[in-house]
Amino acid sequence: MLNTYFKRFVMASGLTNFADGVATVAWAWLASLLTRDPVLIAAVPIALRLPWFLFAIPAGIITDRTDRRRLILTMDVLRAAAFLLAGFAVWQALPLDPPPQAGVSDVILFAILVGSALTVGVAEVFRDNAAQTILPSIVPHQALEKANGRLWSIELIGNGLLGPALGAFLIAYALQAPLLVNAAAYILAVILMVSVVGDFRPVSTGTRDWRRELKEGLQFLRQHRLLRSLAWITGFWNLLFNMVFIALVLHVQENLDAGPRTYGLILASGAVGGVAGGWLGDRIVAWLGPCRTAQTMLLASVPAFFAMAYAPNALALCIIFAVFEFTGIVWNTVSVSYRQRLIPDALLGRVNSVYRLMAWGMMPIGLALSGALVRMTDGWLDRSTALISPFLAATLGAILLGWLGWIALARGFSDTQSSPDP
């Protein structure tokens, strides 16, 4: 049921997500070596996530107009070039000066890192949208839960397990090494995707008119309440998760007195839970049903955010992240499979892009809030407490989101059962 082309597609996605995992450590850690200001540190991952807010809509329109495999190939080549530039810039700037509490120690290098992250982020928007819309053309619709689960498991092994762990060791060995390894990974992914053969150009629905095309995507999303609910719940959850992302870097460094290898292993531990979620997600959905599965996974983030703040050591934080990622991947098994099955292929890119604008466009807001919250509380709270303030704020936000989301999911899934989607 899962054919050879799917396996090659999964291998290519695994390599690109391996590179993303390496970069998860590299971007934030390199920024922390140039400044100790949490707002400036947040600027690099914000540059990586801001394109989801700016380019999600154009990415959807282009995805529904062009060969989706060719779009994937182009974006992976662009990301390889961006990582090569960043790696060369870091190598030229060595050795780095000590990071100041305010400002940056190397303005040119910091600007190159932000610019490279922005380029990678833009390419990721187009690449990921095309990759998610191409999957229903590779596997049968009845196998989507299984295919998504296997795909996310492999991606998490790269993105969350191998990538962060290797990235931490590479950055401890040579600061430019993780960036150059990433460039090589994207090139290998391009070679694999070239061998995936098929017709991946969607059927045209008329003359090209971006206003009409965008209106069609918006109308489809507006007509399906459950799809809208899944989008805004995912968006606010991503905002809360990214609130803790920047705080986690400084929390590990200062509160837990740990280095990049420990930080990488903490991120990698989350992938262990995520891989388990990817392999077990379809079984959990079959057992609990999609509605109760989504509701349960959403509520699980409340104790997870709170426990992150008060984990006594790195080992406890590893366990928390494993459980946290497990629930997140099982949630994705429900939400992504539902929209892949519901949305017609000719509209999949546009509706998917509007959905992901709502779901992923909130990420840079969370990153900015994280840095701002630490900076604001650092004056009237002690430094260690200020560093965990985003975790506590995320906990309160998760309580509200869990309550509202539980009601919205119950109503949305009830609609799908009482009247079949067109």
Image: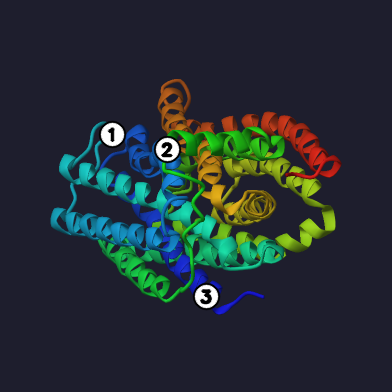
Q: Quick one: SS at disc 3?
A: helix
Picture quarter with the N terminus: bottom right
Of tags 3 and 2, the one toward the viewer is: 2
List the single residue furthest toward the top. 380
Q: Which sits in the foreground, 199 or 323?
A: 199
Residue at the (69%, 66%) spot, across then down: 143
Residue at the (31%, 67%) spot, across then down: 181
Q: CA distance from mark 3 to mark 2?
A: 31 Å
Question: As shown in the figure, which amino acid type bears the numbered disc 3?
Answer: Tyr
Q: Position of residue 50 (x, y in %)?
A: 39, 38
Q: Quick one: SS at disc 2?
A: helix
In this figure, which residue is indicated by the disc labeled 2? Answer: 210
Q: Which sits in the foreground, 194 or 111?
A: 194
In this figure, which residue is indicated by the disc labeled 3? Answer: 5
Query: Decide: marks 3, 2 in contact (CB < 8 A)?
Result: no
Q: CA distance from mark 1 to mark 3?
A: 50 Å
